[in-house]
Structure formats: C-alpha cells, structure tokens
Amino acid sequence: MEESGKWDWKISPVQKWYDFNWQEFVRYRGLIRRFVKRDLLSNYHQTIMGSFWLVLQPLLTTLVFVLIFGNIMKISTDGFPSLLFYLTGNIIWGFFSDCFNGSMYSFRHNLHIFKKIYFPRLIIPVSVVMTHAFRLLIQFVLLFAISFYYLWTGDQVELTWRIFLFPVLFLLTACFAMGLGLLVSTFSVKYKDLENFMQYFLRLYMFATPIVYPSSIVSEKYKVLFWLNPLTPLVETFKSGFSEQTELNYPALGIAVLVIAVIFTSGVVLFKKRELKVMDYL
Amino acid sequence: MKAGKLVIRAEGIAKSYRLGITGAGSFKKDLQDWWHAFFSSGKKGGEHQDNDAFWALKDITFDIREGEVVGFIGKNGSGKSTLLKLISRIYPPTEGVIKGRGKVVSLLEVGTGFHEELTGRENIYLNGEILGMTTSQINDCYKDIVAFSGVEKFIDTPVKRYSSGMYVRLAFAVAAHIDPDILIIDEVLAVGDAGFQEKCLAKIQEIASKGDKTIIFVSHDMNTVRRLCNRVMYLSEGSIIADGPPDAVIQKYLKKEQIDYFLQEYDSPEQAPGNDRIRIKKAQIIPPAEPSGKDSSFVIKASFWLTKPATRLSLTILVYNFMGDCILNLDSETAGFDTGLIEARSVLPAGFLNPSSYYVTLIFSDGPDQLFEFPVCLSFDVAGHTESFSRAKGLVNPGFPLLLKQASIA
C-alpha cells in the first residue's frame, strides 16, 4: 500500500528546469545568514583596522582614480566634484564585479563542501551577493558623508528625488551580476578557459561602462551601442542622484530592466538545472 | 522484525564516469553531442562515449524501510562510496531514480564547512545549518553539543588553535545532535582516538535503537558492521552481490574477497612486483582452521628473489588496522644474503590481536636503505564473539600474566 504513496524527494539523472524547489530554498535561509556572517567576520580577522577596510578599500581606489584619470589625464567629470564622481562609479562597479566573480566561482570555491554535503547550491551565490550588499550599505554611509560635505561647502552637488531609486538600481545590478555569473559558472566548471577569458572581459567591460568617464564624451556613432549596455543606464541614474541637471534615459533603463530580467532568470534556472550535474566535471 | 514503512527506493541506478582528460578533445565530443541532441531527435547522441566511460555502479535496485540499519560493504572501488554520494545528492545518477521520504542528513566527513578563523561557537552554528538544522534547533541542543565535545574552555577560540583531536570532537558533537529521519554515514568513525570512537559508536547505536530512524553506513571494519547493522549489502564491481542479515553477508564477503588477499603468488620474477633489487614470489597469511577456537594463531609467510646480493638485508612486517593505525612492527634480523630465493615466516599468536580487520605491508631494506615496499599485500579478519557487544579495549591483547590473590581475610 505505501509502495505507491507519495515520496518526499526524488533524485533522477536530469533535473527539470521547472523542478525549482522553493520551499527547500526557504528552509535553508538561515544558512545564507551564516555564510554572510562567516565571510564578513573571517575577512577582517587579524587585521588592525578591522571593518574599517570596508570603507577604506573603495576610498583608496577612488583616490587612485582621482589622481590618474582626474588630475593626470584630466578626463571630464561633467561638472561633478571628481571625488564624488569616481566614488559613485567605483561603488557600483565594485559591487557588480564582486557579485559577478563570487557567483562565477560558486562551484569551484566551494567544492570541498559540495563534495560532502547537499544543500541548494543557489545558497552560495545568494549569500555572496548578500555579503557584498552589506558592504555596499556601509560604503553608502561614506558616500552620503562626502556628498553632505559638498552640499555644505556649496559645491555643484544636490540631492535629488532619484536617490530613492538607489535600492532598485542596486537590486538590478545584483541580479545582472549574479545572473551573468551563474550562466558562466555552469559552463566554466567544465572548461576553465571561460573563467580566464572572463577576467579579461571584466577589465574591458569596465571601460565600456561610464565609470571613469562621463557618458557625455561618448561620440554619436557609438551612442546606441553604449546605452544598450545594461550597466550604463544604472550607473548614470546612480550619478544623477547627485545632480539635477542630468536627464534620465528612460528607454535605456527600460531595455536594461528587460535584459537583466532575462539574464537573471536564465542564469538561475540553468544553475538549478545543472547544480548536481556539474559535479561530474570537478 | 516488523517491516516499517518504505523510506528509500532505488530503481535501477547506474553511474558512469567519463575517462580521460577534459580539454579540446572532450569539447569536440560535447559539440557533437549537442549537435545530435538538437538535429537528430530520437537517436541519442553519445553512444560513442561508451568506450571511454567507466561504470562505477550498474543497475542497483533496493528498498530500505524505516528502522533499518543498513551496512554497505565491499572492497575499495566496489562502488559503495559512489552509491552513498548518489543517495546524498552529491552527484546525479547516470540512470535510474532514487526516491525517498523524510529528511536526509549525510555525514561523509565530520566538520564540513568548518572555518578556521571562526570560533568553536560560530562553527557549531555554521556546521549545524549546513547539516540542515535551523538556528532554533541548534539553540535547543547547544549546551549538549558543547558538553559532548568536551571543549567548553575553548568555545570562544578560533578553531585553528584547536588540536586535531579537539577539532574532530567538536565536529562530531554537532553531527551527533542532528535529528534526521535518514542518516548516512561514511566511515566518519575512523577519526579520533579509540575512546572517542567508542563514544561515537555508542551514539550511533543509541540513534539506531530508537527504531524510527534509518541509518545507512559504510565501513571496512566488519566488527563494527556486525555490531551496528541489522542488514548488510555487499557490493562488488558496482553491483549488489548479496543483501541480507549481517552474519550471512559478511561471511560471503570474506569468503569471496579476502581469499585473494590471503595469498599473492607470482611464478616468475618478470611479472612479480618489485624492482631491480627484489622481486616478490609469495606473500601469504594462513588463517587458523577454526576461527574462534583455542589455537587461532595466524602464520605470515613471504618469499622473494634477491637479484643483487645484500650485505645487511632485513624484512619488516607492518600490521595495520582498518582505521589506518599501525598495530605491529615486526623486524627480522639483519644479515647478508646472496642472490636467489629467500623465505620468511612469522606467527601471530592466538588471541593476540583483538577482533577487527587488519592488513599487512612488507618492507625490504638493506641497512638504512629501503629496497622495496610491498604495501597492503595481505589482509585478514580476526573473528570475535558476535554475541558480545562490548569490544575488548586496547589494540592488542598480549596476555601478560595478571595475578589476583587474597592477601587477608576480613
């Protein structure tokens, strides 16, 4: 009689893409918190400055940018104070590349755990993104402190209503980075070439995105292509939070949302479908 | 025994691994497979793969019921670990389906996910949640875990400062307090000192005795299997050869597999293991005719060809148990020998080794230089009394006289 009863779980050679076990994922939500805590704690153990590094890292990179791109190469910042200009770019780019790298190496960096125990593998990239989101939050404190300084000194900075878009912008950035990382991860476990290649792609991609230069210097010829990059409208909208003058490019934002939705969905679905299969190649 | 409800059903599961290196060659094959998958529907691509695939498991079917303690036994490479990993959802099967009911926790290793930099307390929570516990469940048994581990004093110290013994005890303490319906254990007992192993075994026995838990267990140690399990499956070359009550299956296993390991004999030096100094002719262990009888001594014999004269030749026999501890080191005398055939013989007296499984390694030396090591060339089991559950303490039982006498009468 019980032979024909209902089974709680089933392991078969091929996982169907629609077998997405949400309940299971939710049951393990505590684990996400543990991984985030682990990564935050272990990163700053045995450092003198501890969690101050969270703020120091983007600040140092920004100072290097200010020095090289601002003072030496004298690239325009569209009237922004250069510190604020490069800091905004750096924060959003750092968040993107950290989330992308973390998701891409989901399998390879956690192999020792994956070989011994099962839990929904998606926990790993999600907790990586959460860790970086937490770091982002602290960097925001720095960003607002600096923008208030400029407001106070009467520089060309203003706080616009668009700062309320920031959470959405970062959610989109996270989804984009994670989706892309997951897509790559499911293929790169078998052929590492893709991982090596992606590191070059990432460097190139930073220069295709208006991080160290304003979008105004891009020539008409490349404008369409330039705005098709989903990160471009996100970065520009982020920067426009501090200046009333810049117009929002709504069509580009719309396209970005669509592209990101497709990439994120396909990344998650493919990752889920292949989460066990990839273990054969590692 | 009353049959409990069905908790695991494996239907025709098989697992193959692709042999060879992943690179440009395998990429070409992948492309061919994709091509087949997309453009020639019906006919499945990848038949050409069969030549370079290794089948670790073939057509495995079984049912496991609630309350069963199932032991998987078999030689290294028989597929038992692969099977455990399939049930644990580490790898997908190549064919077949495994279905089950209830929460599964697998302990293929203790302390999975432990992080060196975190404290003992933080690691208890991290490891517990990896094993599928919730924070409140860990809170409830946190005190018990710490008490079981015996590392209270160091609980707020990073685990990288722990000794390996403390580390393992803490890790096992977490594992011992999870509360799954189905528990999968892969020789995690082979860690820690003998006293701690005993504690672990007792814990598993306690879980098993409740009757509503199902345990799947892999071990090389036949005495542990006999002690814990109420059903044993014997795997060989990826298939289940026998399935049934422990004693019968273990006997079959020992008969089938161990005999090869009682004797290794080579007719000519050319085919024999060895090198340009030494070639093995024969390594043999002669078990007692009557395993649990009075004279149950084991005789170890070896003979080998010496191809170059040695001035200070010696032979060392190492006896290991299956936990990997070296139990004995027997050294022969050192002497000069000419080329030709040399024979060696030794006896392990009756009752000297406690009941367990053992293997033998031979090492040939010329003075301080090691000529050749013949590792794990023999293996044998010392039978115990299956009725008695308590194992003799200690690794060996040398039987030194111990006298009691009444000194005075009160």
Image: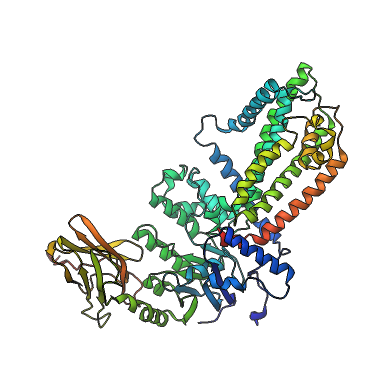
Name the image quarter holding the C terminus of chain B: bottom left
Residue B290: name its quadrant.
bottom left
Residue at (51% x, 50% y) in the render: B124
Left or right of B387 on screen, residue B330: left
How many marks overall? 0
Left or right of A80 on screen, residue A67: left
* Residue B212 seen: no
Residue at (51% x, 75% y) in the render: B68
Left or right of A102 on screen, residue A149: right
The structure's colour scheme is: rainbow
* Residue A51 seen: yes
Report x, y in % for residue B36.
Answer: 69, 69
Report x, y in % for residue A7.
Answer: 66, 72
Seen from the viewer's position, the closer of residues A121 and B265 is: B265
Above-or-below relation of B21 to B243: above
Report x, y in % for residue A177.
Answer: 70, 45
Seen from the viewer's position, the closer of residues B25 and B246 is: B25
Residue at (82% x, 30% y) in the render: A216
Report x, y in % for residue B84.
Answer: 52, 68
Seen from the viewer's position, the closer of residues B248 and B52 is: B52
- Furthest toward the top, the residue is A153
Seen from the viewer's position, the closer of residues B400 and A172 is: A172
